[in-house]
Image (cartoon, helix red, strand yellow):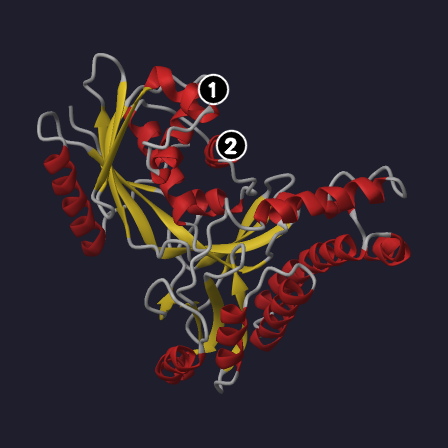
Amino acid sequence: MSPTHLSLSQARAERATWIEQKFRQAFPAGPRPAVVRAPGRVNLIGEHTDYNDGFVFPLAIDRDIVMAGRPSPSTEGRIELCAVDYEQSASLALADLEKERRDPSPEQPGWARYVYGVIWAFRQAGFPVGAVQAAFSGNIPQGAGLSSSAALEVATATLLEHLFHLQVEGPRAAALCQQAENQYVGVNCGIMDQFISRLGRQETALLLDCRSLEYRWIPLPQEQVSVVICNTAVRRGLVDSAFNQRRAECEQGVHLLQQADPNVRQLRDVTAELLRAHAPHLPPTIARRVQHVVEENARVLQTVDALSAGDWRQVGQLLNASHESLRDLYEVSSPALDLMVELARAVPGVYGARMTGAGFGGCTVNLVQKEAVPRFLETVIPAYCQQIQQPLSGKPEAYVCRADDGALVLQEFSA
């Protein structure tokens, strides 16, 4: 199923026009480009469970990557890219995609590898995609844990599907984008970020089983409660962080627990009873990692039940418990994240707050009563700026978000 075509809001229409203009500045000659967009995401709960075949509960947010592109006129099949926000360009021959994957050139900017990786993954899967000219821009804070990289991947995939007339089911497209990040970029991420960027819907969060890829949209009524994202302005880079180390620790936990129960294929298969019986025999660090994943999976399902019952207080308590677990058991929080969470919870009308994303920096997600949002915005960020004790890479900010659509074609290619 191709990405859904919807009537454009004025804001989307303006962004489509703007990125087309930027594209034409970079690539003056040729037909009118297609324009696509793919959103970032915030994960309400279910952190570091996706690559353990567990459950996650993200929503697509109303910040995105917009990309204009068309098939390349290059006779040698050359991919030509323009990153508008960086004022940088990059190019690579299709024939060199595999070489670049195996031996990355220092002359290629890091952002280009996400685009190259998606083109490589589609071609590896047998899809007849060729070289493209593309320009892109985004308003997703980078390094903040809101999946700007996945949005870039999904925007690229959406552009390829449109330009080369492909019919790719949403879960398959998300899996190809995940493959690009795993095998081309070198980050062993799960599939959540790409999945929600492709398949998000307005006014819903998505319950995703990362093993079966079964999913369902859960209404997220925001008449009384707002989802507020707070950016700590502490950047974190997944490739250089402890992300891959945490994944290796989970794999070690699986290996050790398989000796007790051969049915354990991933931490998803570990029950609370099995963990209680065998945790004393695990290395302490591995036991903590496993405990987080087992309990976090349970919290995701409990959150969906509480949300369906309209019990926002219970949802908030589960978010709070998730943060404590990520801080103490999985050890991926940071002083900045802990401070932001502490300040948010001190505001009357806040149901719950926790870090979101891979950790080590980035953002928190907060459930706030509508009437408490102005006070939240007035107090949390100023207090954080006063109390934070480490250098920041940008300006801390709070962002009231709404659940938005996944990938869309905003303007069709006109040859």
**Residue at the spot 39% in from the left edge and 34% down from the top edge:** 113
Element type where label 2 sits in the image: helix
Looking at the image, is 147 positioned above or below residue 380? above
Q: Which mark is residue 216?
A: none
Pick the front one: 203 or 389:
389
Residue 317, percent from left and from top: 62, 74
- At label 1, the amino acid type is Gln
The numbered mark, 1 or 2, whose residue comes first in the sequence reads 1
Q: Is 262 left or right of 314, judged from the image as shown?
A: right
Which residue is most to the top?
Answer: 75
Element type where label 1 sits in the image: helix
Which residue is most to the bottom?
Answer: 348
Q: Which mark is residue 179?
A: 2
Residue 300, percent from left and from top: 63, 59
Looking at the image, is 161 positioned above or below residue 383? above
**Residue at the spot 52% in from the left edge and 30% down from the top edge:** 183
Q: Is 174 left or right of 34, judged from the image as shown?
A: right
Judge whether residue 126 can be spotted in this image. yes
Judge whether residue 155 can be spotted in this image. no
- Asked if the residue under mark 2 is in contact with the one under mark 1, i.e. CB atoms within 8 Å, the reply is yes
Which image quarter: residue 334?
bottom right
Q: Which residue is mark 1?
A: 124
Residue 120, percent from left and from top: 42, 24
**Residue at the spot 20% in from the left edge and 17% down from the top edge:** 74
